[in-house]
Image: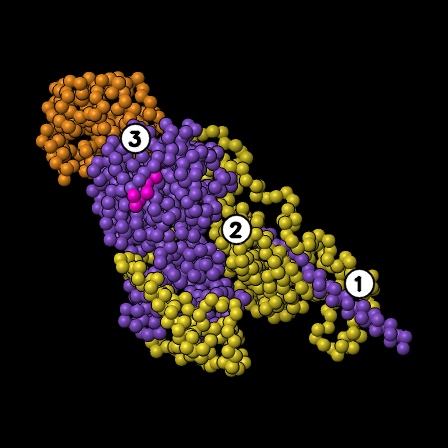
Amino acid sequence: MKVLSKVAALCALTVLAACSSNDPSNWGNGGPGGSGGAGGPGAAGSVNDPKSPAYFQQAIGDRVLFAVDQSTLSPQAQTTLQGQAAWLAANPDYTATIEGHADEQGTREYNLALGARRANAAREYLISQGVAGNRLKTVSFGKERPIEVCSTEACYTKNRRAVTVLTAGLTG
Amino acid sequence: MQTGTKISAIAHATLIGWAVFGGTFRSEPLPFEVQDVSIISSEEFAALSAPREAPEVVTRPEEPTEPEAQPQDVVVPEPDTPEPEAPQPEPVPAPAPDPVPEAVPETPEPEVPDDTPTLVQPEPEVAVPAPPADERPKPRPVDRVAPVPVARPDPDTRPDEVESPAVTEDDGAETPQEPSEATAPEEATDQIVTEATETDEAAPLRSPRPPARRPSPPEVAEAPVETPTGTPTEETPRSDTPPATEDAVQDALAEALGGESTAPAPTGPPLTGGEKEGLRVAVSRCWNVGSLSTDALGTTVVVGVDMNQDGTPVVSSIRMLDSQNGSDSAARQAFEAARRAIIRCGASGYDLPVEKYGQWQTIEMTFNPERMRIK
Amino acid sequence: MKRLLTSLFLGLALIAAPALAQNQPLRIIIDEGVIEPLPYAVPDFVPDTPAAAEYAANLSRVIASDLSGTGLFREIGKEAYISQVTSFDAPVQFADWKAINAQALITGAVSVSGQRLTVRFRVWDVFAGTELGNGLQFAGTTDGWRRMAHKVADQVYGRITGEGPYFDSRVVFVSESGPKNDRKKRLAIMDYDGANLQYLTDSSSIVLAPRFSPTGDRVLYTSYEGGFPRIHVLDVGRVERRVLQSQEGTMSFSPRFSPDGRTVLYSVSQGGNTDLHSMDIASGQTRQLTEAPSIETAPSYAPDGSRIVFESDRSGSPQLYIMPAGGGEAERISFGQGRYGTPVWSPRGDLIAFTKQNKGRFHIGVMRTDGSEERLLTASFLDEGPTWAPNGRVIMFTRESQGAEGRASLYSVDITGRNLRPVRTPDGASDPSWSPLLD
């Protein structure tokens, strides 16, 4: 119930279409938010509105990618996270859950642990950029929620990710 | 055992069965009782398994001896089992089991294709110039592993241990031979092909382990039996005796002993290496370790067998003389597999020179599965 | 007279000679044989009553399916039979069964009275003309006829092979449906052969890796119910579940029972680091067993409870380690090429099954507990998560096919690497856990 009400609240903040979208990342499984990010494309205003989650998601980028088996942040990932940190600083009403993911090449257990490492790497970096730790949760989905479904490196590279999912809420 | 004791035993077994099995299944799985109660005594079993015409069965019920083999089993006269002394043709049970509905819908046929599923090969790895060493034919997974690979036989042939040509009546042979099907050994590989070994790249690096084939036969050293390398008859002075004399004396002896059937058989010189090898190969063909436990596959058994002069084994004489490296139960299964091998491949007589009968009247076979275990 | 004496003497000498020869049996060593399924026949059991006819036929079919399913036996179809078994107590016509090369014969009789089903059976070594073991009788309810068939098959299997029983067992697993990026998962339980499938949870949350308790009455699993992975325990009979472990800001997963069922081993991820913990179920008291910056997960107890095998990447890549059950110095046991994971100790204690990833392929393999004699049993795009049959002879695991249409399914394989076969499930299936033998 609690989860449902959260989801409902999130929907209320976003354009309706976002919640029923066909976004492959929207797995609607009762978890807090989808792995693709809060609300999906066009959420809460427009990409042009720098205060909108849509701007966070698309203009800044809600995700960072990792090399095979790695949880270290590339320079590009660090740039993205700097942008996320700045946005979070400017929008203190939002908290975030960072979801760590792995590609399918690995055992279920190891990938869960690896996803946790990735999520934590992103979280640590955001904290180093001034975001308060109590605004950032982490969770790992291991290889359970790929965003791309093919079994080649083209897909794997997108699945090895840490996604910062915004939650509009005072406490989070 | 007194009837009262038996009844009590049954009652107890039932009660325990109920307590153990009936009581714990409040939810699922479904209630279930097991009664480890043997149905009839082992004499009765023996009687039943005796040849049908065996008339001595009539005397059976006179012997109330308890079976000693399974003292833990409660022996009860199964109430609705007709006493076995009258093995007359059984009236078929009331409901002649007509063609029972064969495929019952709710049986979720767990049958599955025997073949290993075809693997979807991942993108071929970067074409490294293939080492030509791999041109040797790759073993195909076949249901049967034998010492020597056997090619897929003609589909018409019936599987048999030995290859024999088809005999047809119009062969114009002098001695009429019964027509028989052509037989051929079943297709076999000479090593276990697992999925992991099937694929090229998956001859994966493994931790060191003993090589599959040892250069020398170390099992001889391990076996407690004297090695058969020396001819077993070396010490016997008989070889000095000219055969003629021997025969003459034997004749005399047979006469003296009143022509008893136990007259010593011709002994002859020791078997040649080829003759022994022939026997070894013949038994090997039927020695199937494919249905043995991993424990039994680690157990060496020494089996003794007395032979008839026609080369067939005396089935009742087959006995386990020794076993090594396994539990009693593993040794028993290993022995049973060995016994099956001796009986099956000896059914029509092993090819042994009758003039040397004395040399192979008794045979001790050591069945060492070590090489089969790591195939 | 002298001649007579001489001949007598000679005769005596010769009597001695054959006697000596008989003490010197011919000795041969057989160290090569064949490996093939043992041909057997299991004619329909004889119904004692008309009501038993259907059960009689079905029982023998399930028994045959169990035996042939091991890959160690091959059934000879009834079309080949020379004689029929029409009475359980009539003598067996061994010659008729020899003629069709049935090396083992299973005969049985079934009677039904009300809901009560009674099965009697015997196992025969056809060529030796002897019975293997004694006749046995099982009694139960008609509803449980499949279990009774499994019981009989277990007996037959044990008497011929010497392995322990395993047919009368169940498997809990994750039933999967839906596309790869939105997979619905729910817990399900079934007989080892796929019959009697039941679902234990709905698919509203991701569920992972169920594990049976040593008595088969409870199942541990990981669920995302609430948004974060946490360990739940489910009572199989009552289908009741509760969260076993929950600590704010952490994820817990990869649970496994101790052999006495009192302790749970599991992984906890906190601050990106994953370590092993244990919990006393009764008191809820927890204990951290490893403290390393590396990933430690997928723990499994030795059957005697003294040691733990687990997966760790402390060396730089995932490998297998063994340490005392209470924590302490860990010893690496895997040294082959590639990455090793999800080790599971065999119920016999002699082997450890594992997942191995090497050169873009996955394998299920086994090794001795000191890491020696590694053998890979399977190879595919993705094999993982082995679980042992109660007798330690067969391994079941998850196989996933690749690509957008990739689907997970269950497979089993003999520890010799032979007899790889799919386990039928209605939907996709993953993460099997084999129960102990029922009883």
Q: Considering only vertical position in the picture, is A40 above or below C392?
A: above
Q: Is residue C85 visible?
A: no
Instruction: State how far apart marks 1 and 2 are (Cα).
Output: 43 Å
SS for dot 2: loop
Q: Nearer the viewer, mark 1 or mark 2?
A: 1
What is the x, y in percent for residue C414?
44, 49
Q: Which residues are magenta?
A: C277-283
Reply above or below: A86 against A172: above
For chain B, the rendered hue is: yellow
Residue type, numbered disc 1: Arg
Foreground disc of the pair 1, 3: 3
Q: Is residue C142 visible?
A: yes
Tally the numbered discs: 3
Tag on residue C270? Answer: 3
Give the color of chain C as drawn: purple
Report the front residue among B287 and B144: B287
Which residue is at 27% across, 51% downward? C236
- Read off the residue under disc 1: B238
Q: Secondary structure at mark 1?
A: helix
Name the residue located 64 percent from the left edge and 66 percent from the top edge.
B306
Marks 1/3 in contact by CB < 8 Å: the verdict is no
For mark 2, does the 10 Å Cα neighbourhood hold few (<14), some (14 to 19), or many (20 or more) residues? many
Work out whether disc 3 and disc 2 sit on a shared chain: no
Q: Farthest right residue?
A: C2
